[in-house]
Image (cartoon, rainbow, N blue to C red):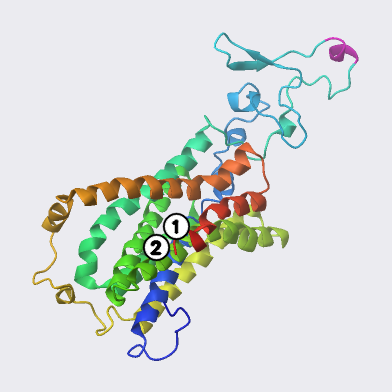
């Protein structure tokens, strides 16, 4: 596979233009698809859904999330002296300050609760905040299922260049609108529509299959898909360490910084869509795709899906792919926030560690 062959006109070199067009567009789609994932706690803070924003510790000291909290850095617990549990072994309150601390102790020793050690955004399991982030992640993944199914027909009708450029253009709108997130409902809606760009994988594979001969098409498909999926790992690092953290260090407010950061992938989407339209062909010999290339004599229809599902091998592959890729999407969605919430890691460290999962695609597929 001549990866470095990028020169020449489109007539002279349609194959590698398509390969890099498919790879880069899919990479950017993944980058934008999961751009909000490592910023989950910042978004929750901006929406005001963190547990300690909805239920201020001073007024609601016995919230379960607080009673279970312990700083991993200092070893200090929210309950200074112990936790009182009910018959089901669930925490219900902190133990009272014992003698002699309650009489002769310092002001700190007389504290039953220590709200000062709580994270800036408490978003652990069982909190509304945690549920909002998780549900938005499900929405982001759920939408791509339906679009991927529909793309089978759309690709045969409009060709890979038009479909890929269209998906990126549509996605750019919603990625840019993410900068306007203000409440859980629009956070979930925006993530749902951003998830549509996940269907660029279908175009990625369809396009490479049209462009390459049987002796190399497997390598082309695997590499294009793997390096495209790499975006799911890169975005964890890119959004935090390259965009968000430098903005914070320069004095920008966190609420503004993550919103500005979301504009970057939106711009990249538009630039990539324009580049595809100007520089790439659908097939090696024609600018636009025709179903006759595949030996079909009639236009695609919904009945094609029924015919495909009659083959048990297709059903087996659907089950297999849903399990393995579903796990990957779950990791891309939750790892960074999980590390920050449960291991109280710094945002940059958590995103770098979470990114390592997606970065395996660099070598694991091709």
Q: In x, y percent, where is residue 324?
A: 39, 48
Q: Residue at x 83, y 25 (%)?
A: 108
Secondary structure state at the residue bearing disc 1: helix
Relative to the observer, which residue lies in front, 16 or 278?
Answer: 16
Magenta span: 99-104
**Relative height, residue 105 to residue 350 (above, below):** above
The spot of residue 104 in percent (x, y) is 91, 14
**In this rendering, position of residue 55 left or right of residue 177:** right
Q: Are marks 2 and 1 in contact (CB under 8 Å)?
A: yes
User: What's the CA distance linking mark 2 and mark 1?
Assistant: 8 Å
Q: Quadrant of the N terminus?
A: bottom left
When asked about the image quadrant of residue 156, the answer is: bottom left
Which residue is rendered at x = 35% and y = 67% of the image?
A: 218
Q: Quadrant of residue 276?
A: bottom left
Name the disc covering residue 33, or none.
1
Q: Is residue 185 visible?
A: no
């Amino acid at each position: 596979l001549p990866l470095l062959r990028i020169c020449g006109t489109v007539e002279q070199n349609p194959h590698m233009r398509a390969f890099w067009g498919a790879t880069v567009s899919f990479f950017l789609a993944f980058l934008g698809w999961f751009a909000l994932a490592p910023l989950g706690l910042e978004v929750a803070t901006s929406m005001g859904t963190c547990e300690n924003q909805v239920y201020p510790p001073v007024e609601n000291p016995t919230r379960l999330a607080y009673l279970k909290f312990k700083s991993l850095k200092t070893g200090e617990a929210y309950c200074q002296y112990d936790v009182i549990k009910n018959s089901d072994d669930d925490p219900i309150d902190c133990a009272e300050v014992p003698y002699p601390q309650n009489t002769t102790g310092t002001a700190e020793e007389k504290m039953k609760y220590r709200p000062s050690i709580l994270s800036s955004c408490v978003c652990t399991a069982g909190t509304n905040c945690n549920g909002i982030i998780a549900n938005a992640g499900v929405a982001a993944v759920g939408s791509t299922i339906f679009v991927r199914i529909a793309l089978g027909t759309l690709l045969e009708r409009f060709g890979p260049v038009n479909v890929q450029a269209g998906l990126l253009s549509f996605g750019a709108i919603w990625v840019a609108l993410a900068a306007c997130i203000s409440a859980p409902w629009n956070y979930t809606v925006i993530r749902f529509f951003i998830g549509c760009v996940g269907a660029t994988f279908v175009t990625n594979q369809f396009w490479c299959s049209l462009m390459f001969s049987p002796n190399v098409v497997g390598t082309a498909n695997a590499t294009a898909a793997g390096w495209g999926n790499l975006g799911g790992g890169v975005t964890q690092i890119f959004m935090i360490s390259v965009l968000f953290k430098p903005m914070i260090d320069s004095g920008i407010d966190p609420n503004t910084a993550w919103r500005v950061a979301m504009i970057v992938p939106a711009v990249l989407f538009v630039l990539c869509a324009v580049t595809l339209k100007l520089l790439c062909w659908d097939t090696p010999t024609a600018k636009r795709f025709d179903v006759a290339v595949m030996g079909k004599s009639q236009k695609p229809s919904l009945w094609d899906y029924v015919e495909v599902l009659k083959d048990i091998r297709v059903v087996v592959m659907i089950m297999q792919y849903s399990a393995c890729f579903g796990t990957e999407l779950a990791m891309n969605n939750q790892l960074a926030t999980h590390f920050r919430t449960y291991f109280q890691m710094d945002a940059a460290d958590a995103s770098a560690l979470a990114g390592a999962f997606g970065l395996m695609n660099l070598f694991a597929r091709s």
